[in-house]
Amino acid sequence: MKKLLLLSGLLAVAVSCFSQDSYTVSTKVVKARVPATLWGLFFEDINRAADGGVYAEMVENRGFDFPKPMTAWSTWPSSHLRDGVFLVVNQAAVNAADPKYLSVNLRDRDTVGLMNSGFDEGMAFRNVPYSLTLRYRQVVPGVHVRVFLYNSRNKVIGRASMTLLQGADWVNQELKVMPTDTGTRGKLLVIFEGAGKLDVDRVSLFPSDTWKGRPGGLRADLVQKLADLKPGFLRFPGGCIVEGNQLVHRYQWKHTIGPLEGRELVQSIWADDVESRPTPDYMESFGLGFYEYFTLCEDIGAAPLPIINVGMSCQFDAAEVVPVNELEPYITDALDLVEFANGDTSTYWGKKRAELGHVAPFGMKFLGVGNENWGPQYAERLALFTDRLKAKYPDVRLVNATGYSRNIPVFTYMDSVLRARKADIIDEHFYDTPKWFMENSNRYDSYDRSGPKIFVGEYAAQSDRIGSMKNVNNLLTALSEACFMTGIERNADVVSMASYAPLFAHVTGWQWTPNLIWFDNASSFTTPNYYVQQLFSVNKGSVVVPLLASGKAVCGQDSCWASAVVDEGSHELVIKWVNMSGRPLVRSFKLDAGMSGMASVTSLSAGLSLVNSMASPDAVRPVVSAFPVKGKVIGFTAAPYSLNVIRVKINR
């Protein structure tokens, strides 16, 4: 306990040493309007966020297209049956996007099978129907198919059979399997029996209760956690996967739409980018592709913010670039993406979108050009993209990168270049200590009000150090982020967007920590950092109003940070107040407007080192209370180490 108090004392930054017992809140003075996009989400396929995560596919390597085509598959009842019975056929010359399929050759009434172990910890089965889809063609009729679901004790808990359709063309056939029991760490067994020859291109298994019940869709529990944040935007698909560690592995949005057999699998940059946690089977199937991202944005009410590659691979790795005179395909992809999102059905890509099921345009207003890129090579390529995009789509606001850290010289270089070019939005990233986040809540107070808007595109307090495997999502990191976020909110006329990163992480399949939401194959939990994000987002308000201590913004005085907004729709004042001291603090908030009735308070407080987990998902969570108010003064006592959000009706 003494060590914890010493730590908190070192981190509680005091701008002044005096105690200020009262704050003034000028509800009738509008400092800035709060952008609808102020608090949002950053999604990257890291930590198994997509395949094996929010994308609900349960079969790993469903199309046998991994570099090692039998990854996650084993033959049944023994491995010798692979000889001459199961053959992986490489058809890359016919379809590079779908390069392999499995040929099943049965003789003399054989009974053989394939067992799939699923992602990471195996398959989790619940009391809901499951949809198995087999993509196949009959070369020589006579093969019959049965399907079994197994739990971790090798007990069959679900079974079904499939009568194959006649014909020699590729077909997709679906059957339903209803488990008789639940199970974790389970497996799927597909039995082939009879005499004949069957080509199998895909074996797929999805639960029926996906988000909005969409076949081949997303995990409902994980998407619900996103929806509960009420995000203003969703940035996708990354992150470093936009660039890839080689350009051949970069994210190409046109490869991620349409039939699954046309979505070209690539190896993820995260397969081998973290030496201490190699994940050689980390591939991107793009079952969650750009069409799905756009519909997800629509589902959760978030503005889409896609990021496109500028002809540069990840500068941490190969720093591979496309010569500027060969950028045309990259620029065309960017222009076509805007047409896909916003074009009507008379356009080529608008028609493609309609054919996928969405006739109306998505109304995309933002486009990120590059991710964590920097230097003259980025500036040169960015200029070419900007000129072409702005000439055709002047109303789409472009987000430009400044590199990966504010601590490197190229950050200053890129910032100066982008300001000279009068960029729309500058993307800044911060991974740093809790102390840094607390000390820098005033970062944007001095930014040029007439300059480019700022997107705080990635930020997270690190409990140990950036890139450390020891980082945890404890209350200390969450509260320090809350301190920083009061500064973002206070400067909403400069900062138009902000998002924590990364978003998702599998409890055993992660490469990076900390993360906002953790999950396994059956369930999930949220972190203290998640609750901080949620408390700011759902209490965003309409306009920023001054909250001052002796005429100054509250950004560290007596270990306190605070900001205030007014929700014009509900006629409520919303105060966000962080107490980073180890003692309760009493404050009076003096308003220039009257109030009466009850004030609601949502508080997040606990020991600074506490974390949530699968075993204790609610160790740290907000608590809601209420108290009566009257007149023009709110008196409130904040618990030690707490974020408090106070909402009260006002007569403004």
Image (cartoon, rainbow, N blue to C red):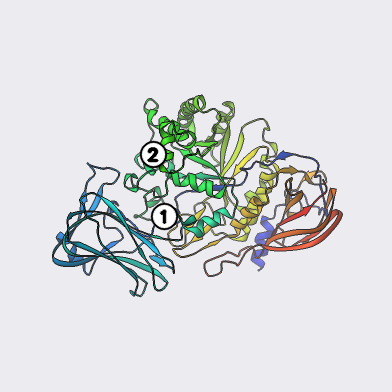
**At which x and y percent is residue 528?**
60, 59
**At which x and y percent is residue 71?**
29, 58
Instruction: Give the Cα separation between the discs numbered 1 and 2.
Output: 21 Å
Q: Is residue 38 left or right of residue 149?
A: right
For this orientation, the residue located farthest to the front is 166
Residue drawn at x 84%, y 48% is: 593
Mark 1 or mark 2: whose residue is earlier in sequence: 1
In the depicted structure, whether residue 563 falls above or below residue 517 = above
Residue drawn at x 65%, y 65% is: 607
For this orientation, the residue located farthest to the left is 108
In the depicted structure, whether residue 160 falls above or below residue 362 = below
What's the residue type where badge 2 is placed?
Lys
Q: Judge by depth and name the residue closer to the eye, 312 or 531.
A: 531
> Residue 1 got which mark?
none
Image marks 1 and 2: residues in contact by CB distance under 8 Å = no
What's the residue type where badge 1 is placed?
Pro
Label 1: element kind: loop
Q: Using the rendered image of the protein, determine whether residue 340 is visible from the camera's viewpoint.
A: yes
For this orientation, the residue located farthest to the right is 631
> Residue 254 got which mark?
2
Quadrant of the rendered structure where residue 145 is?
bottom left
Q: Is residue 219 left or right of residue 245?
A: right
**At which x and y percent is residue 332?**
41, 30
Q: Judge by depth and name the residue closer to the eye, 386 or 379.
A: 386
Q: Which residue bears the numbered disc 1?
A: 215
Residue drawn at x 49%, y 52% is: 467
In the depicted structure, whether residue 299 falls above or below residue 181 = above
Quadrant of the rendered structure where residue 250 is?
top left
